[in-house]
Amino acid sequence: MNFNIKSQLLVLILLLSLVSCSRNYTLTSNEKKIYKMDSAYSPDSKVVSIIAPYKIKIDAQMNEIIGFSETEMQKAEPESKLGNFVADATLAEIKLSEPQADFSFYNNGGLRSSLPKGNITVGSVFELMPFENELVLLEIKSDSIISLVNYLIKRNGAPVGGIRLKANAGIAQEILINDKPFDKSRNYFVLTSDFLAGGGDNYIFFANPVSRKNLNLKLRDVLIAHIRSQTKSSKKLNPILDGRIKITK
């Protein structure tokens, strides 16, 4: 294939994001479909000529190495190195400006690829998070936390940071938030994406929060910033499985 399909997709993502800067859109739904490409496929020469100047510039941006991972990261349940990394990294970055954030909560469906062992590029993160999801900080009541935990148990886990859960036979046995037992008398602040905060993927427990703060930061950009900061501090990425979610039937 003379023209890399992945590069074309990254070009289109960037062009669409530039166009969207002048308009306000709301994501109402999404679904994943896989289309097989004919092995005899050849790109349209006119399209190639239009995209080529942008491709050169974008390839340079996407191929920039921003970090190094000592392990491959893939998503899995009830926890995964990839999910732990994304949840912990974004929570750590946001806590620098929003120290009240208690924990982070995402969905595996939002993680669209793995991260490789070795060099991590800007393009690696774009492939992981091709959507324009932004971060929000929600203040929610304790009963919403219980609904959230029940969802975790039902779905056999999800990417979380700052929260630990042990459950048996569908019932939570232990809930820790910031290494402290769950307190039913207080509200908690959860970091998540605007898609999930709006009820995406059936996250109904985020409905009617006590307060909502739109951080105006793309989840993807915050993750890139974290990787850059780790590299600047001469640190390599090395997420582990730490048993933050233990669910037994």
Image (cartoon, helix red, strand yellow):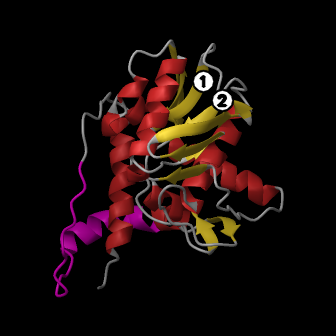
Residue drawn at x 33%, y 47% as measured from the top left: 16
Is residue 229 visible in this depiction of the protein?
Answer: yes
List x then y, in percent, for residue 2. Answer: 31, 84
Q: Give yes or no for residue 38 being in the magenta stretch.
A: yes
Residues at circles 2 and 1 in contact by the CB criterion of under 8 Å: yes
Whether residue 200 is situated above or below residue 5 in the rendered picture: above
Q: Is residue 34 left or right of residue 75?
A: left
Magenta residue span: 31-56
Q: Is residue 10 left or right of residue 106?
A: left
List x then y, in percent, for residue 10. Answer: 39, 61
Q: Amino acid at mark 2?
A: Asp
Q: CA distance from mark 2 to mark 1?
A: 5 Å
Specify the quadrant of the image occupied by residue 39: bottom left
Q: Amino acid at mark 1?
A: Phe
Look at mark 1 in the image and give the residue it sits on: 189
Is label 2 in a helix, a strand or a loop? Answer: loop
Is label 1 in a helix, a strand or a loop? Answer: strand
Look at mark 2 in the image and give the residue it sits on: 102
Disc assigned to residue 117: none
Whether residue 141 is situated above or below residue 154 in the rendered picture: above
Residue drawn at x 70%, y 55% as measured from the top left: 228
Q: Nearer the viewer, residue 62 or 83?
A: 83
Quadrant position of the N terminus in the picture: bottom left
Q: Give yes or no for residue 27 being in the magenta stretch.
A: no
